[in-house]
Amino acid sequence: MARIVQKFGGTSVGDIERIKNVAKKVKREVDQGNEIAVVVSAMSGETNKLVDYVGEMGAIYDAREYDAVVATGEQVTSGLLALALQELGVAARSWQGWQIPIRTDGVHGKARIERIETDEIDRRMKTGEVSVIAGFQGLSPENRMTTLGRGGSDTSAVALAAALGADRCDIYTDVDGVYTSDPRIVTKARKLDKITYEEMLEMASLGAKVLQTRAVEMAMKHGQRMQVLSSFEDLPGTLVVDEEEIVEQELVSGIAYSRDEAKITLLRVRDKPGVAASIFGPLSDANINVDMIVQNVSAGGNATDLTFTVPEAEVKRTVQTLEAVRDVIEYEELRSDADVVKVSVIGVGMRSHAGVAQRMFAALADKGINIQVISTSEIKVSVLIAEEYTELALRSLHTAYGLDGD
Amino acid sequence: MARIVQKFGGTSVGDIERIKNVAKKVKREVDQGNEIAVVVSAMSGETNKLVDYVGEMGAIYDAREYDAVVATGEQVTSGLLALALQELGVAARSWQGWQIPIRTDGVHGKARIERIETDEIDRRMKTGEVSVIAGFQGLSPENRMTTLGRGGSDTSAVALAAALGADRCDIYTDVDGVYTSDPRIVTKARKLDKITYEEMLEMASLGAKVLQTRAVEMAMKHGQRMQVLSSFEDLPGTLVVDEEEIVEQELVSGIAYSRDEAKITLLRVRDKPGVAASIFGPLSDANINVDMIVQNVSAGGNATDLTFTVPEAEVKRTVQTLEAVRDVIEYEELRSDADVVKVSVIGVGMRSHAGVAQRMFAALADKGINIQVISTSEIKVSVLIAEEYTELALRSLHTAYGLDGD
């Protein structure tokens, strides 16, 4: 017997038939004697519809009302899945964020979970009742509904699993696990049986869309075992676990990429103390997320070139922000380029092996791909290259690190 | 300055533009210095969609989950209207049934309001903030969402008006008031400026669809002034008030009708003590609502004929129920007829005037319309006639009681 939290995303509960199908999957776990809590997203398309409604009311809106409107999507699914389970003879009831309650801070639209009062759910799980919990929702200190931001249901599931002391948190989705790279591009990509939290976290934040970064962070913090698996097929998925659980660690576990990058270059910035602060201070104030940063000494004395990346959607605001402080920064020219992609190799094996980055540089050079920016961390190496080389780079690196399957 | 509760039904908030239009109507009252709370229904079509979802899960369902699913319709509208008001510069916030809370009993799907904790809303109304309240919803003793049954938002509005000590409860709908009869049939029907609670109650329960019976009952109990008026036109509506407020009372205020009637006749029932109980006991146990009842002495001794009406949808169950106890009741024949209509004349003036019923019988006889069943109360006379005479009967009675407008 195990205690399991199962999470089903929007496409998994996209219509009535799919909700009934989810009920069957839940019942199978119940029949095996497991204690089950289920976290559900809104039916696919519902959240977008509700967000559009709010947008039609005006460009600037009260996030508390946004949350009241948008949280209804998950409420509907939770009630319907409880009914579908009852129809199969499984004891079940729905729970809203405010009923449990899942206490969050008061940052509406992207609230953080602070505390979950699990006593009643815990008691009911022990009697065999399935708790069907509306994901994405919580209750603010002012007793208003909050939402956790896009993909927040993953976070709800992991937080509940940790609070309930679950043996596993199963994230059901429309892919059947975590792959060594995007299978749509790299046909030789393989599904991983296991991956460490750290690697999953890097993959999530570097462009792999299979799990929310915050959910993985939380799982890592609590040592909560997770599994990513398919709602539509009966196959084992990928386990996300602690490093110690992985006996034979590969050098590199995966190759991720993100097209959502733009490169900003400031040419001949006057090289004086505090220049970096004068650039990145205003960007931070404007809430623009800066990623890779490189500073080169420029030929010819007291000037330097500075390059960094921002999300593609932020290019215009970045340029505006920097032009407004041009007098302070004193740069000669500002260039932006959105035709770039960030490609990353990820693996905890890097910690104990030298030459991992070198193999990447060599493989890309071999194909004539120019590296524009490099950024490294303990378990990943990222490079910025021209977007047109995306597929070629991914496939070459996949082969170079010995990841190709049959 | 007045304190007003405004209620807007499903068609009034049917899409984003209409919700913005409602916000303008609310703002106008606010601009006049009034304290406003607004009760909203779900956008038209939403509740039906949600009810259908629940129905697709299985024929028999847990009413607590039904309520969790169906209550989302009003939640969406309340958030959107609060946003639309803020966009017009009016301070506003949404309230769900569980937030106020509106405490109900635990009869899910048709709960009754027991208590409303208005302190916080009262405090905010005094500061000029508009409270936008999701109608139709409440909170059960077990802290689960309840709904009040179809049309329950009218009841929410009246209950809130009474609890908040409102000067008036304005029910905005797609008609512009209460008419002397259905204007689609009786072209000479007139809009009434005022009507008494008792008359409105009879009209509501006798087929006029403009207000929910329960809402009128509650208004009458609390002496809560109400007004029925149009969301789409700027015209005064019909005030529903205490009898004393109406100086010149008409003999008859309106002619109502209901096609949703079926006549059941039991022929040659053995006439013995307790026979009525043996018939209506089983029907009551089966939750079948019996309306008009007539018992005639039959020619020839120890048998009697018994006629009554039930809602058209209940004919089959009524017949099954009575056939199951045929041995106990001992009747010779059971007949049912759904081609009937109940026509009622209503007016508190009847209390002090004789001959009101006689005028009805004479007017119908004059047109050759046969009366099948008669039932009277202090302020109404109802007759059952063949359905094909509906229009003729309504127009004739409207003229006979001097109700015709220009």
Image (cartoon, coloured by chain):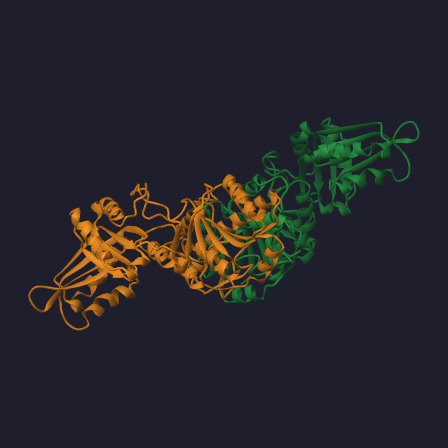
Chain colours: A orange, B green
Q: Quadrant of the C terminus of chain A?
A: top left
Instruction: Please determine whether, in this image, residue B33 is positioned above or below residue B350.
Output: below
Give the percent coordinates (x, y) of residue A61: 40, 57
Is residue B34 something that shows in the picture? no
Q: Residue at x 57, y 57 (%)?
A: B97
Q: Residue furthest bottom?
A: A273
Residue at image location 39% in from the left, 56% down from the top: A246
* Residue closest to the eye, A170 or A45: A170
Q: How many marks?
A: 0
- Tell me where residue B340 appears, x and y as whole percent: 70, 31
Spot occupied by residue B114 in the image (x, y as percentages of width and height):
66, 58
Q: Is residue B275 above or below residue B137?
A: above
- Residue B289 image position (x, y, % from top left): 73, 41
Q: Residue furthest front?
A: A248
Mark yes or no: residue B107 visible: yes
Rendered image quadrant of residue A304: bottom left
Identify whether A266 is placed above or below B136: below
Between A294 and B40, the one nearer to me in the picture = A294
Left/right placement of residue A176 relative to residue B57 reads left
**Residue B107 falls left or right of residue B355:** left
